[in-house]
Each structure stands twice: as structure tokens, then as C-alpha cells.
Amino acid sequence: MSKFVSYSNPRTRALLYQIVVLTLLLGLGYEFIVNARSNLQAQNIASGFGFLDNTAGFCVNQSLIAYDEADTYARVFLVGLLNTLLVAGLGIVLATILGFIIGIARLSPNWLLARFAGGYVELVRNLPLLFQILFWYLAVLGTLPGPRQSISLTGAIFLNNRGIIVPAPVAGAGAGAVAAAFGAGVVAAIALASWGRRRQERTGQRLPLFWPSLGLVAGLPLAAFVAAGFPMGFERPELRGFNFVGGIRLIPEFVALLVALTTYTAAFIAEVVRAGVLAVPRGQTEAALALGLRRGLMLRLIVLPQALRVIVPPLTNQYLNLTKNSSLAVAIGYPDLFAVFAGTTLSQTGQAIEIIAMTMAVYLAISLLTSAFMNWYNARIQVAG
Amino acid sequence: MAVIAQPSYVRRALVEPELPPIAAGAAFGRTRERLFGGVFNTVLTLAGSVVIAAVIWWTAKFLLIDAVWSGSSRVDCLAETVGREVGACWPFIAAKFGQFMYGFYPTSERWRVDLTYALGVILLVPLLIPRLPCKAQNAILFFGAFPVLAFFLLVGGVFGLPHVETRLWGGLLVTLVISFTGIILSLPLGILLALGRRSELPIVRTLSIVFIEFWRGVPLITVLFFATYMLPFFLPDSWRIDALARVLVGVALFAGAYMAEVVRGGLQAIPRGQFEAAMALGLGYWRMMMLVVLPQALRLVIPGIVNSFIALFKDTTLVLIVAIFDLLGQMRAAFADPTWATPVTLFTGFAFAGMIYFLVSFGMSRYALFMERRLSSEAVR
């Protein structure tokens, strides 16, 4: 017993150190709580989450759900969260596409194309993201002409300093049939691909299934569209007086944020893709070429499936970065979660502790969920066994 | 031995061979093949040349050819006054240069900032060149003595130097102060957290993991808001922390969590034998880490540390959201000045700030690359 409590016993020391660390931490936490309580009382700030039921009383310039000034702070929270998810979700899809294109272009045998992609990556990666957001917002979109002198693309899309106005799709009678045809086409294409794979395993023949699949996915709804008598129309934006009527207006804050996030993250994704492709041993490419595969097929069948195993973990990090970076919206006034909740709501209610804790918790939850999903996907594509 | 599933199909006849590739000749032939091999490739090359030429032409035209080089107000940069198309309005930058560099730091005291920069450069340059001797002493001077000296020089209030409040600081000065302090504070914090994460003590390990994952999971801007609006509530009333110092605390915690992951990578790369040899020599935990493991691990992660520094340098721009005016913040404030409101002011400002950010970040990333190559060639030897 006396041997156990001796300081020279490593287990005793380990226990002692941990007790010291824990005591210090609890002491600090207690100190924080006591201070917070007295500070809040001194400044007459309410605590608790009761403020969520109060009327917000401010406008939000983009909302995916119905919202007006009479709604509560809880509703504001939801509006902001949806706006964050919208810009992050779209950003992730677009940045992935652009990033893969640039990453592959950097490895292109065409010297000029590779250098061009390399230059893009260096330029975009070495400028701060906030700088780029402000550049797109102030210098590019901010200097567009007013609504009356809008720049018109093909007469249907209009660019001006109040945003981008695109035609709004309007569903007529029979649009449901088109949607159903599209669904059926997708299911049929998946079934066809699966049948083709099984047939190839059995006979070794590759059937050219790309065009039939495209026919099923695009052609079937198109046929239904014609058969139902063109049930889908587009509401064209029209200039009336000083503003546009009809169509969907994408606010400049949204466009600037989306463009900046996409182009910035794409540069990082391009590097990830390049590193992943380079990580595939050269023998694999040589073997593919020796088998007579062309470059496109070689990339698709041999290189990319192996590269994906290297790419996915760092790609997850980039997705998380993009989502977290979307909080920079507050600098240009896009109403994301951070801007409307930690920005406006905080300055109106003064309840910093609850609001910042809630905001941090949301981003933390998004981060943990995304990484959990990507870990699952990553485990799926790794070599079994 | 794994059992290999019997393939259901085996090809029995050879596939028709593809045509042999066109022989690539000497350097000229290879270049031609790379740029003009095939229709698609040729189209790409031609389109690329046009785009690149246009970009270079427009940049040169804006920054140099059409630029206005002297003047005293917006009138000198208007197309109507100059009588031609107007590019960059450099007099705007010249007029605001003091603000961009020092913020509202009193003009008579700006030599103190310059002296700090000079001292920093004198100490930093020998540290970056691997060939030069006395790395340990140099590092102690740069990471230990220099910050203290810089603090007294910039803040003042001692040795007869007048006190300069931090709210007067701005521009590049603030950008550099935040990124430099962030890296200096985050290094020890990151090392401790990395050691904690690999510790065998369960409570210490759990706390380190929670701490690291928490700060890495939230955006920097929430951390800055936390430091600016939430932290004061948690501290005793008598502690009135300066706004810049609060931001520095937030940046240090945030950067520390990222640094911990960089250092952990280095710790994992040290072979087990090194730990075992140190223990066999009878070294305790701290002496083993300080004398054997960390010197090797930290050397390995120099590129990673430089990369975190680049990230931090770019991230300092976020402080403008909590009303601290760094280089970008001063730039944005200068755009609102009606004396210089012209159609080209915005583009001139972005071009100038962009060049500064690009040169610093690009320079550092090249340095990280250089160190990486050097370290990997040493590893081979």
C-alpha cells in the first residue's frame, strides 16, 4: 500500500497529474460562471433562451421560408441556417466540379493548359478569402449598371447592381407526368448500368451504354414534356419602371459569396485532386496504356478509382472549410446564420453567451455530421480486406 | 493467402492492337506534340494563348500603360480630366499609404514601427537560411526576446516613449502583429496539445482531443466574436482587456488547435525506437520530449508550420468584421473617402492590397516547398 502511494510510482503520479489538471479546469469553469453571473446582473442582461420567442422586428433580404418582421428570433435562426446550408451546399457541388476540372487540367499533357491551371491555383490560394469576397461584391457586382441599363444575356438573364435576374420556371398542368418520366428514366438507367456490369463480368464485352442511359434520363422526360403539351413555362423578367418584375432575383450578396467560395475552394480541391492522381503509381498508367486504353478511359477506369481513396479525406476537410468559411457572409451582408443570428440578433438582445454558444454549436454539428458522412463514404471506397 | 474468386470470364483471343503513337522526336518535336498533338489539343492551345495574352494585356494596360501616376485628388484620376481611358489611380495609394501601413499610429512615432520591422527582418532572415550557424540562439532571440522588445517599442509608455493606444494601430501593422503573435502563441500551445493528445493519461488525452476538435470545428469568425463579446463576461470586472488583445487570445486558441495537428504529424513520424532509446537511457517524459523527440519532430514539420502561418496571415483579414482595421479594413475604409471616389479607385485598391497579400503568401509557400525538398533529400541521405 505504501509503495502505491509513493510519488515514484508512475501510476500514482499519473493519477495525481490528472487530478491537478481536472481541479484547475473545474476551478476555472467555476470562476467563469461566477464572473458571468455577476457581470450579467451588473449590466442588466437577461439570460436563458426565452429571447427566442420574442419578435425579431428586422427584415432579412433573402429567405427560403416565409418570414416577416413580426416573426420570432427562433424563426430568424431557422432562416439563417437555411441560407447557410443553401450557399454551402451549392458551393460544395460547384467547387467540386470546378476543382476536379482544374486539378485534371494541371496534369494535362498540354503544357499551356497545365500552366494556366497552375497559375489560377497559385493566384487564388495566395489571396485571403475575405479579400476575394469583397472584390467580387464591391468591385465586380457593385460596379454593374443600374436596373434600367441592365446587361442582358440572351434577353432572358439580366445583370445589374441589384443582382442577377433569371427566368422563373412555372409548372403547368401535366408537369407531374414529366417529373414521373424523369424518375422512371433515372431508375431505368441505373438498372441498365447494373445489367451492363453483370453482362460484362459474364462475357467480357463492354456495351456502349452511355448514350442509351442519356436517352433514358433526358429523352423520356422530354417525350413526356412534348406529349403533355409543353406544361412547363418560364416567367420572363421584365423591366417595369425602375425595377424588374417576374423571374427570380439572386441577390448580389449571394452571388458574390457563392462565386468567391466556389473559386477559392476549387483551387484547394484542384491541389487535392492533383496529389491524389499523382499518388497512383506510374505503373498503373503505363499498364493501362499498354492495354491500349485511351487517356479518357484510362483516367475513368484505372486512375480515378484509385486516386479517390487518397482524395476523399482531404476533400472532406475542404468541404468543412467551405461551410465554415460561408460565415464570412457577414462582411457583405448575406443573411446567413452568422450574420442574422450572431450579428443582428446579438446586437439587438445583447445575449452574447447564449447566441454565440448556439452559433458555435450549429457549425460544430455541421462539421461533425459532414465528417461522419465522409468517413462512412471513405470506408466504403477503400479496398476491402 | 486470400482465396481469389474464380473470374467468370477470361478472354481467350488477343485484342486488335492500337496504332502505334506518333514518334515524339527531339525537344522541338516533343513541344509540338505537347501543344499541337491532335485537333482538341491544338484548339486548347490556341484558345489558351488568346486568354493568357488578353489577361496579360489587360493587367499591363490597367496597372502601367493607362495608369495615372501623379495627382492630388479624385479629379486627376477622372477620364474627363485626363482625356483618355484611365487605369490604376496610383496617387490614391500614395495619399493613403501611411494609413495602409500604420493605420492612425501617430506620424511622429512611426519610426518605432519601422524599427520593429527592421529588427524582425534582421533576426528572421538568418533563421530562414539553413546554412547559417547558431540556429538555437537565433530562434531564442526571435521567438523569445523580439516579441518582448516589439511589445515595448510599439505600445510604449516606458523609456520615455509615449504610449500609443492599440485602437490607433491599423493597416499592415495590425495584420503583421496579429499573425506574428498568433504563430508565437500557438506554437507552445500546439506542442502542449499535441503531446496531450498522444498522452497515456486518459483525462489529459480526452481534454486535448475535445479542445482541438472544438476549435477546429467552428469558423474563425465565431471565435473572434467569442473573444470580443463573450470573453469579457467570463472575466472579473477589474480585468479590462484591450480589444486587440482579446482578438489575439481568440486567434491564439484557434491557431493553437490547428498547430497541434501539425505537430502531431511530426510526433507520429518519429520512429518508436527513438522513444524507447530515450527511455532506456533513463530520461523522464519531459526530458525525453525536450531532448530527443521534439527537436526531430519540429524540424520535420517546418513546412507545415509555415503553411499554418500563411493560413493565419490570410485569416487575419477577418478582424475587420470585429472593427479592427487591418490592411484590408483600412482599404475598405479608404474606399468610402469622397476625396478619392472615382470609377477606378476600387480596382486600384484591390490591386495594391492583392499584390501585398500575394507576395507575402506566395513567398512563404515557396519557402515551405524549398524546406520540404531539403528535408526529404536529407532523409534520403
Image (spheres, rainbow, N blue to C red):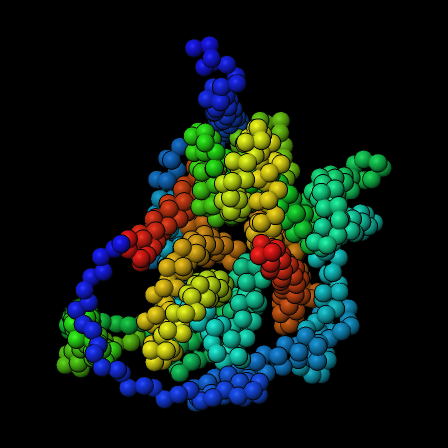
Residue B88 in percent (x, y) is at 68, 73
| Quarter in which the N terminus of chain A is drawn | top left
Q: Is residue B119 left or right of residue A99?
A: right
Quarter-of-image position of residue B340:
bottom right
- Number of marks: 0
Compared to residue B222, the image places residue A61 above or below, namely below
Residue A95 in percent (x, y) is at 42, 65
Q: Nearer the viewer, residue B216 or A45?
A: B216
Compared to residue A272, the image places residue A192 above or below, namely below
Quarter-of-image position of residue B209:
top left
Q: Is residue B142 visible?
A: no
- Which residue is drawn at the image coordinates 43% and 34% (left, top)? B206
Residue B182 in percent (x, y) is at 61, 45
Q: Nearer the viewer, residue B284 or B109?
A: B284
- Which residue is drawn at the image coordinates 62% and 26% (left, top)? B238
Compared to residue A214, the image places residue B264 above or below, namely above
- Which residue is drawn at the image coordinates 32% and 71% (left, top)? A301
Which residue appears farthest toward the front when viewing the image? Answer: B1
- Which residue is drawn at the image coordinates 75% and 57% (left, top)? B98
Q: Is residue A324 visible?
A: yes
Residue B9 in percent (x, y) is at 18, 72
Q: Is residue B153 left or right of residue B7?
A: right
Which residue appears farthest toward the top when viewing the image? Answer: A2
